[in-house]
Structure formats: C-alpha cells, structure tokens
Amino acid sequence: MKKLIAILMAALMCMLPLVSLAEVELTMGSWRTEDTAQVQALLDKYYEMTGVKITFLPTTSTQYNATLRQQLDGSIGPDLFYSRSYATGAELYDNGFNVRCNDIPGVMENFTDTARSAFTAADGSVFAVPFAAVSHFVYYNKAIFAEQGIEIPKTFEEFLAVCEKLKAAGITPLANGIAANWDILECVLCGMIPNYITAEERLAYESGEKKMNDETWVRIYSDFAKLVPYFPEAFASIDNDQANVLFGIGDTAMLIDGSWSYGTLSGDDYDIDVGFFTIPAPEGFAPGFSLHPDFGIAGNAASAHPEEVRAFLQWLASPEGAKVAAAGVPAGFLPSISADVAPEGGIVSQMFAEGEGKNADMRFVWSKMMSLYTPMVDQLNAICRGEQTPEGAADAINALWEAELAK
Amino acid sequence: MTAKPRKNPAFRGGRCIRPGGIYWMRYVIPALVFYVIFMAYPMLDSVRLSLYEGTAGTRQFVGFANYVRLFTDEVVSTRFWNAFMNNWVFFAYHMILQNALGITFAAILTNRTMRGRQFYQTLIFIPCTVAVLVMGYLFKIMMNPQWSKAPLENVGLGFLVHSPQGWLGDPGTALSAVSLVSVWQWVGIPTMMFVAAFQGIDDDLIEASSIEGANPWQQFTRIRIPLIIPVIGMVAIMTFVANFNAFDVVFSMETLDGAPNYSTDLIGTLFYRYGVAGQHPVGIPEPGVGAAISTSIFFMLLCGVIPVLVKTQGKE
Amino acid sequence: MVKQPDFSVKPVKAEKKTRSLRIMNMHIPYHIIMILWSFIAMFPMWFLLINTFKKKTEIYKNFFGLPKTWTLANYEALFSGSDFLTYFRNSFFVVVVSLSMILFLGSLCAYALAHWRTKTSRAIYYFFVIGMMLPIKIATIRLLQIMKALNTVNTLFSLYPVYIAMGLPTAVFILTEFIHGLPGEMYEAGYMDGAGRFRIWYRIVIPLIRPALATVAIYNLVPIWNDLWFPLIFINREDQKTVLLAVTRLQGQYSTDWPKLLTVLSMSALPVIILYLTMSKQFVKGLTAGAVKG
C-alpha cells in the first residue's frame, strides 16, 4: 500500500503547475558549441558596458536548425540567434521570426552590398546583422613540409606534385574523407571553384547563359578527381572530425578545411605547427579566393525585450562594437563589417591577406543553386568511389539545372 | 494440476472477472487522458499537416499534393523507396537474428538449475545502457581500417578488416554493418521479454513432460515455444514498429543522409531529413512531406501489424 | 539451439543418476554459449573503459591498447564540475517519475482491457497500439504549444507528460498480453474471497506480472534516459538540464577530447545499470510468485 501511495504522490507531483521566474536576461542561440567560452566572455564584456546580460546557449551544429525552428515556432526561441546566410536564414524571416534590421543604425552604412545581400530577403528586408565570413584553406603541417623540403605550392600542378612527393615518401598527403557528406563540397570543391569561375561568371551559370557541363566544369571535376588518390586509406569511412584528427595528430601532411577549424588545429589539443594557403589555381587561371558570408546575428521578433535586442544589434553593426566582437570570436571567422576591425597581425588579418588581389566569391551553389547541393555531393562521392567520370558528373548536374530553369 | 499439459487457448485467461460492464472504464480513463492529450491528439493533428505545404508562417492547404509528390517526384520517390527497402533489410536482421538470439538466451537463462543467470543477463543488457552516440563513435573507429587494420592484423584477425573503404564506407556492406551493431546493442531487450514470458510458464507442465519422457529440446519446441506464441507475436510487432522508426543508430554512424550513397537511409532518417530538419545545408523542413511519409508508413505498418495481432493474440 | 543429451528417462542406478544429474545441472554447453556472447557483448565496453583513462589525442594514436600513461583527469573533471550532479539528479527524476506513472497507469489500463471484452475495449486497445506506429517527433510543435499553455516549458515538468504518454502504448500492449495470459483460477480465488476489482489488481495481478512490469520499465528506461530531442527543445535552463543534453553541449566544446566525452557518457550509463539491476530483481520475485500459483 505504501508503494501505491508513493506512486500516487508522484502522479500528483506531475500535475502541479510550476511558475517559472521571469528574469530580465537575454539569450543567444548558436550552433557554435565550440566557442562557448570565448563568446560568453565577449557577452560578459557587453554586460559590463551596458548592464544587459546575455547568455550564450549553443546547440550542436547538426541539431541547431531543427531545434531553433521548433523553438521559434513555439515562441520560446532565444532573443538573439545566429542566422545562417541566404535561403536558410531568409526562410525564418519569411515566417515572421526575425526583427527587420533595415532601420537599425549602421546596418545600411557599415556593410558592403555583397556582405549584406547574403542576409537580405527577397523583399529587400535585412533579416540579420552580417557578422562573419569564412574561407577555405589547405592547412599544412610545417614540420613535415620542412622535413621534406617542400615549398608552398603556387599552382595546382605544383600542389599535385607536392602530394605525389609526400605519397612517395610514405606520408598520406591529404586527410580529407567523404563520410560526413558536406565538407567534400563546401570546403574542397567550393574552395577550388573561385580559381576557375569569377563572381560575374557565376551569374552567367545561374541564369543558364553558360552550361553547367561546359569545359570549365569538366576541368573542375577532373582536377578534383586528381586529388582523390591522395586521400587517406578508407577515406569513405572518414568524417570531418576524424579528418581533422588525422591531420592534427600529425599523421597526414595537409587538410582542406574551413577557416573555422584553425582555432582547434592550432590550439592546445594538438602539438603540430600549422600553416595555411588557399587551394592554388591551375596554370593559366587567375587565382580566386573563397570568402563565404557564413553567419549573421538576428533578433527574435517575438522577444520580450525588443529594446535590448535592437540595442545589441546596433552595437554589433557599429565599428566599435564589431571591433570588440572581432577580438572576442575565435580565429577563423572573418568580420563582415566594412571597417577594419580585425586585430592587427592576428590570424584573421593573415587570412584576409591570403585573399589579397584574388577574385573573391562565395560558395558557388549558395546564392541561387541550393537545389544542386545534394546532387553535387552525390556526384563528388561517386567520383571519389570511382563510379563517375568528371564528364558524367558535369552532365548530370547540368541536366538537373536545365530542368530547374525550364520550370 | 494434472500431468497432462493443457492446451494453450483454454489455459490463457480462461475465466475472467465479468468480461463486460462500463465499470472498467474508470481503470482505463487515467491512462487514456494522458495518452490522448500528450500523444494521440498532437500526433493525429500533425498527421493532418500532410495535407498542407510550407512551414508555420506560410502554411497552405494543398490536398494530396504531398502524397503525389512522395510517390511520383523522381528524387523524393527514389529516396522513399530506397529507404523503404533498406528498412526491410534492417528489420530482417532484427527479426531473424536478434529475436532468435533473444529466444535462445532466454531459454538458457530460465533454466532454474543453471548458475550465474542474473550475471549473464546483466552482461547482455549492458550495451543497451550506453548512449547510441558513444556506440556510433566507438564502432566508427573500430570498423575503420585507418585505425583498426594494423591492430587487428597484429593479433591475426586481419579478416575482420574490410579494405579499402571499411565496412561503413562501402555502400555494399554499410547497411549490414549498421544493422549488426544495432542487433548487438539491443538484443538485451527481446531477451528480457522472452525471459519474462518463459517464467510465466507453469513449472508443472515442464515437470509433467519430463516424466513423460520429453527431452529438453522437445520441451523447448513442443511446450515452451507454443506457450509463448502470443509473446513472440508481441515482440515481432514491436520489432517491426520500432525498426520503421529507427533513427539514432544511422544518425550516429552514417550521418542523417544515410551515407554512403544512401545505402543506410531508413524511413526514420528520411522522415527527419524532410520533415523535421530539412535537407542540409538549407535546412528548410517540409512538414507536409514528413507527415506524408509518416502517414504512408503508418498504414503500411497497420497492414503488417493487424493480421499478426489477430493471429497470435487470438482474442476475438 | 544446442541439443542437450537426453539424461532423463531410462531407469538407472540411483548413484549414477545423481551424478548425471549433477553434470546436467552444470549446463556446460549453455555456459559456453553465454560466455561467448558475453565476450561479444563486452569487448566494445572494454575499449570504452580503457579509453576513458587516456589523454586527449592518445585515443586516436592508440585506440586498442592500454593507456601509455594512465590518467584520472577525465574523471576528476567530471566530478569537479559539480553541475553534473544536478544533471544526474534531473535525469534520475525524469526517469523515476515517468516510469512509475507509466507502470501505474499502464497496468491499471491493461488490467481493464484484458478483462473487459467489448467492442469499445477493443477499440481502445487498438487506439493505444496505433500510438507505437508514428514517430513522436512529428508532434513536437503541438507538444511545445501544449507545454507552453501549461506553463511548464524550461522545467522537467514539460518532459514527464511526454515520456509518460510515449511509454503508455508499449506498456498497455505488453501488460495486456501478460495479464491475459494469467490463469483464470487466480482471479476466482480472489473473487470468491469477496475482493473488489481494485484489490484483485494490486493483491493478485501486480505481484504476478512483476516480470512483465520490469520488462516494461526497462524497455522504457533506456529511451527516456537517453532521449535528447525533447530536452533539446523544451529545456534551456541550466538547472533543469538532463545528462544527455548537457553532454551534447560538451560534445562541441570537447570535439577533440573524446576521452573526456566517453568518460561522461559511460558514467551516464551507470545509473541505468543500477536501475536495471533494481528492476530485474522483480524477475526473481516474479519467479517465487509464479511458484506459489501451482
């Protein structure tokens, strides 16, 4: 009988309504769990300056989009949140979740049209304050390069020669794998594309003026295919984390990955001395630089504290605020603001320097061709497994895009 | 109790306490209230979404368009049928291998005279307690030649390595590898159910049959198995239903896309991709398509479950 | 199946029979099977365990071997970050409250459905069974709205009802089956004693279906303990987080420090094992109860 009473008590407990305390405190959603300490320190600095407390509540990257949407839908979303660029971010705005940023002082003045366009919805509304861009690099192990007497390659041909030399010396040249199903396109192929196609030419492909299976594309896929022999053993089983580890523990000489990985690769976890360069352009092609608007900070339209939310966004859009923020976020995120806010001589300046005088462009498919993302990943995987030719891949993608344009 | 074993249906629930009367309702209502408010209503209401398009702010009624798309659109229907077939393979591994192991273990573990039964049963169960996240991580390393080739070859187990791409990287083996890991991890659950079922069997029946000269194998096939047919049916149904909702094991070992080349894509991951998260990297979900997938699968499950229920439960 | 030699039938000398009985009761082939499987079941656990004593990247250089230098740092980090006791307590509450309610409501309902045989009861039974066939994730947004209306978002109270409702279909399904399988005479005795239906439920039915109750509890224990989805969406407050929710946040922070992550996660399995052992005692009790019934 006692047990029964205990069970009934438990049942009662369940029914008790609970009053949650209303605290005047903002929350910030993010997918960068890696950055919790740094970003919270930055937000604490903001608290010291303004007296507004903001708590950083990141969710793992793979779950972020889904959970954020459900929370916004149920109106329990965070007051501020990291916003993805382009369609993903715009779609939340279309659902009415974002504060419209056009009239926030600084948003229209302190950013270039290019930087802002990634966070502008179809109706011209700016749905987030642009915050950071990312790039994609070849990371290399300085010790191994020195040991093998290897110079940083200037052209894609030299790059392949370096890979060949390393392979001959018994060192796995590249750590990249294809198990994660995203980095092969986002970091490797989209890192290469600006070497072949400029931002203006991209528009011609988007409009259908140029074909997605022309010479250039076949060349891109063939050059990509030349990298595959230098991937590690069992690359089909290696995901992005494992690729980072293989490079980090010094088992491979190079890794093609996003600029965001610089923090961990150069950090305390690994003992290697890491350097980076952009994926070199083949001879006869003008070198490009992938600079992809990655995230902005959006305000929740349903926030209980709209004043504070706007104040924070305004601060971010000002050179002073952006400077503090740029110093606070981890290395590898390139500030989107036009003002020169990167700490001098810092890693961000070095990354910007890599792009100096090169044709910068974002990840190719992001602006208009998002529907080609998954098919492209599939084609790249097929090339890696040796089941598809560069021509075949280009034709397959072109067919899809033509069908889409015909609609 | 007499020596002769009783026939199954007469034995089970032969006489009941007044099998009628609205009186029973008061026992049902508390569970029903919880179930309706927190599960049935929200779920059925969400199934309704299969007739709509768009997300919260932009939702529109589109009739059966989502179903039409699911079964006629080239990409979506290819993915759907691919996941559907994969799911059957995944289910077959569990149904045949996991449940056979479960019955075997349970039969052994209900031997009254055997020692260490509790110990073995706990060991079988321990893998169930560890989060799938960890299992995914461990097996990803253990099945990757990059890490396991040299150590395994050193101890003469080189044949366990699948070169060059590893069990999880080869589209031909990935689904089997994932299924086997899942069978391995969760075999403790059917074992436990069968143990409970075998324990419900009257000892006298077994004793009586011994006296009549039945050997343990005969006892197993002629008495113990027939007596737990309803439980076997129950476990079969639960295996069936659970596997068509399986998600975690693929997610932790082969990403949401069911890599490599969709060879491990299951209905669970497909549903999550379309209905909840949206395809990476755009991440715009289509709750309508997700609901259409769930609803279609729901009716297929129903077609599979009802006959089994009727046959094994014999309650009508 | 391994065939057992037939020892039982022919009349033999008394002493020989005791000897063969003794050998038979050792069940050697059975032990071989079980030891074999125990090995298969435990070897990944072994690698899990030894890797919690390694430092950061050693796991990738030396996954299969013993640690070159043993370190307890991962365990120290776990217990010095006192937050984890809060997370464990939260998870524990969630599991215990949800399971008690599932068993209480489920067994009452199943008791009724096993005895009350009309079209209505059949309909209710199938209504519950249907609940097993749809993914609960589909209903997340509606559930969130309900929780908001009940003002329980950001507290554990938003999780209890969901888990209880999630567990009920299987509970009703399994328990109805088992109660139905109980021999009818059991009730007659109680009924003749003049016991009411409720008394019969907790005096006769509950003790007899203990193994089934334990089965239901354990079946639901693992998914509830390891659920990530609902805490991820419903809970943002630090002091209300469950273990797995806290861990995934660590997963990002420690993305390269898997030994630490494995430590946390293997520790988070311990309470489940303890709960399992507690509940599986019911199997033994059920056994004795079963012995009485003959």
Image (cartoon, rainbow, N blue to C red):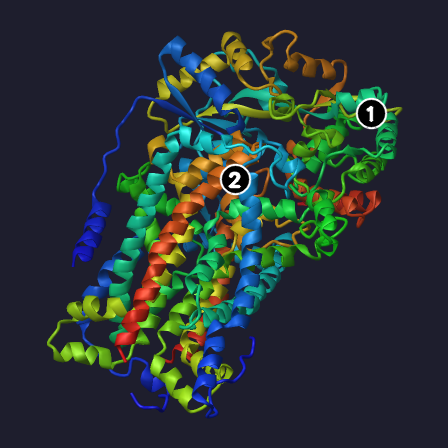
Residue C141 vertical position relative to residue C179 in the rendered view, above or below: above
- Amino acid on which the number 1 mark rests in the picture: Ala
Distance from label 1 to label 2 (Cα)? 42 Å
Q: Return the x and y of residue A262 as percentages of the image width and height.
A: 64, 23
Q: Return the x and y of residue A302 as percentages of the image width and height.
A: 37, 29
Q: Return the x and y of residue B18 as percentages of the image width and height.
A: 19, 79
Quick check: can you spot residue B45? no
Q: Residues within 10 Å of mark 2 (few under 14, many from 20)?
A: many
Give residue B230's quadrant in the image: bottom left
From the viewer's perspective, is B141 left or right of A323? right
Residue C237 vertical position relative to residue A344 in the rendered view, above or below: below
User: Do callouts 1 and 2 point to residues on the same chain?
Assistant: no
Q: Residues within 10 Å of mark 1 (few under 14, many from 20)?
A: many
Quick check: can you spot residue A7? yes
Depth order, front residue of A384/A174: A174
Asked if the residue at tag 2 contacts the one at tag 1, i.e. Cβ–Cβ closer than 8 Å, the answer is no
Rendered residue at 38%/84% (across/down): B207
Q: Return the x and y of residue B68 as percentages of the image width and height.
A: 56, 58
- Amino acid on which the number 2 mark rests in the picture: Leu
Q: Secondary structure at mark 1?
A: loop
- Number of callouts in the render? 2
Which chain letter matches label 1?
A
Rendered residue at 34%/57% (across/down): C279
> Which disc, if any, is residue C75?
none
From the viewer's perspective, is A140 left or right of A305? right
Q: Which residue is mark 2?
A: C262
Circle 1 or circle 2, nearest the eye: 2
Q: Which residue is mark 1?
A: A281
